[in-house]
Image (tube, rainbow, N blue to C red):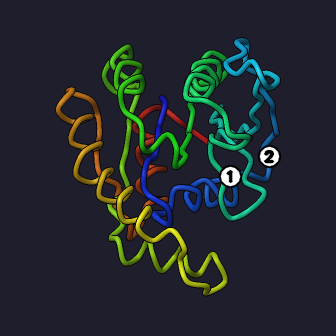
């Protein structure tokens, strides 16, 4: 199963990955993949790291700081999609998230449509805007949010535009309750066949 968790800044995307690593990461093995295609002629082929957890679950992205996710290293959308596709060829279950990915639709909708029912889920955190803002401010050491308008715009776009389009395309696009997102993700992965 592939699980793509989406949300705006401060919604809790990276928190879920950190918690999975905390709960199941004692036996985690780090890995690194390199893109086969060079998407930007001005830089080397992108690389991504992550962790393989028990039960053949891979968490894409390095979580060495509060944030993490697939967009580390400023990769392109094509590179991100290639990494997810490569990961599913190596491991049974893939968890990935990222702000950049949370804001794009087209290629990800088409990609999700290639999977049989139950094998790909694009889940959206239902975290309220004020909670997202408070978390970003806390993460910034209490400093005022300099890009508050961007956070609000992204939050509204995800809630009012992106999630409904995934749903309208007939895809598995549920809302994750922000009060207990880790339990929701574990249950969803379990339903998809993951056994840590």
Q: Which residue is mark 1?
A: 24
Residue lying furthest front in this view?
42
Residue 111 left/right relative to 30: left
In the image, residue 187 above or below residue 2: below
Question: Which of the numbered marks, if any, corresponds to residue 178?
Answer: none
Question: Which of the numbered marks, if any, corresponds to residue 27?
Answer: 2
Q: Circles 2 and 1: CB distance less than 8 Å? A: yes
Return the x and y of residue 142 as percentages of the image width and height: 61, 87
Return the x and y of residue 65 as percentages of the image width and height: 75, 61
Q: Secondary structure at mark 1?
A: helix
Residue 91 left/right relative to 193: right
Identify the residue at horizontal 59%, vertical 81% (top origin).
138
Callout 1 environment at 10 Å: few (<14), some (14 to 19), or many (20+)?
A: some
Where, by quadrant of the figure, is residue 112 drawn?
Answer: top left
Q: Nearer the viewer, residue 102 or 41?
A: 41
Where, by quadrant of the figure, is residue 93 drawn?
Answer: top right
Q: Quadrant of the C terminus?
A: top right
Residue 144 left/right relative to 189: right
In the image, residue 106 above or below residue 72: above
Q: Secondary structure at mark 2?
A: helix
In the image, residue 145 above or below residue 8: below
Return the x and y of residue 41 as percentages of the image width and height: 75, 18
Q: Nearer the viewer, residue 50 or 187?
A: 50
Q: Nearer the viewer, residue 127 or 56?
A: 127
């Amino acid at each position: 199963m592939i699980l793509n968790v989406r949300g705006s800044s401060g919604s809790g995307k990276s928190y879920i990955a950190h918690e999975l690593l905390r709960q199941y990461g004692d036996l985690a093995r780090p890995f690194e993949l390199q893109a086969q295609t060079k998407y930007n002629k001005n830089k080397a082929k992108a690389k991504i790291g992550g962790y393989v957890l028990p039960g053949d679950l891979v968490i894409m992205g390095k979580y060495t700081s509060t944030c993490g996710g697939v967009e580390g290293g400023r990769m392109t959308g094509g590179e991100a999609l290639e990494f997810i596709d490569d990961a599913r060829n190596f491991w049974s279950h893939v968890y990935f998230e990222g702000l950049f990915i949370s804001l794009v639709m087209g290629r990800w909708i088409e990609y999700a449509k290639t999977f049989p029912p139950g094998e790909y889920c694009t889940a959206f955190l239902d975290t309220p805007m004020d909670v997202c803002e408070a978390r970003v401010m806390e993460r910034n050491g209490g400093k005022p949010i300099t890009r508050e308008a961007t956070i609000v715009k992204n939050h509204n776009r995800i809630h009012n535009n992106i999630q409904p389009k995934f749903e309208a395309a007939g895809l598995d696009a549920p809302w994750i309750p922000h009060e207990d997102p880790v339990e929701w993700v574990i249950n969803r992965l379990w339903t998809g066949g993951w056994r840590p």
